């Protein structure tokens, strides 16, 4: 997963965030990746969500994508417990 943002960047376009959520979903579905990599990907999604601008016209799409990412992460969790 290649989700990186320059530390100097202060905002993130909603369309870019939505794309990152799609990458995240593919990451947690990939059985060849380690749990550490999957946790890192989730952490990036959460940090990147904080860069979203609520005044941006596409903010609602990013909010829906964040919900999708959280649900995907929670759906992944039971797999860890078995």
Image (tube, grey):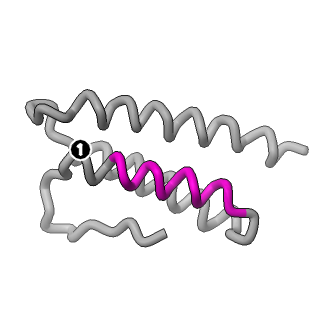
> Residue at the location (48% across, 58% down)?
23
The answer to whether 27 appears left or right of 46 in the picture is right
- Which segment did they paint magenta? 18-30
> Residue at the location (21% across, 33% down)?
59
Report the front residue among 61 and 48.
Answer: 61
> Of helix, strand and loop, which one carries label 1?
helix
Residue 46 vs 66, above or below: the answer is below
Q: Is residue 2 magenta?
A: no
The answer to whether 71 appears left or right of 43 in the picture is right
Report the front residue among 53 and 57.
Answer: 57
Q: Position of residue 21 (x, y in %)?
A: 43, 49
| Quadrant (top left, top right, bottom left, bottom right) of the C terminus | top right
Q: Is residue 19 magenta?
A: yes
Q: Position of residue 24 (x, y in %)?
A: 51, 54
> Residue at the location (9% across, 31% down)?
55
Q: Main secondary structure of the magenta part?
A: helix
- How packed mark 1 is, by other alpha carbons closer than 10 Å (few <14, some 14-19, many 20 or more), is many
Q: Position of residue 65 (x, y in %)?
A: 40, 37
Residue 36 vs 11, above or below: the answer is below
Q: Which residue is mark 1?
A: 14
> Residue at the location (64% across, 65% down)?
36
Q: Position of residue 42 (x, y in %)?
A: 51, 52
């Amino acid at each position: 997963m290649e989700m990186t943002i320059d530390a100097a960047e202060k905002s993130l376009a909603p369309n870019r965030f939505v794309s990152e959520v799609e990458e995240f979903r593919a990451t947690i579905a990939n059985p060849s990746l380690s749990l550490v990599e999957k946790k890192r990907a989730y952490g990036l999604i959460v940090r990147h969500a904080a860069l979203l601008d609520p005044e941006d016209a596409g903010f609602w799409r990013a909010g829906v994508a964040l919900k999708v990412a959280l649900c995907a992460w929670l759906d992944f969790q039971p797999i860890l417990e078995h």
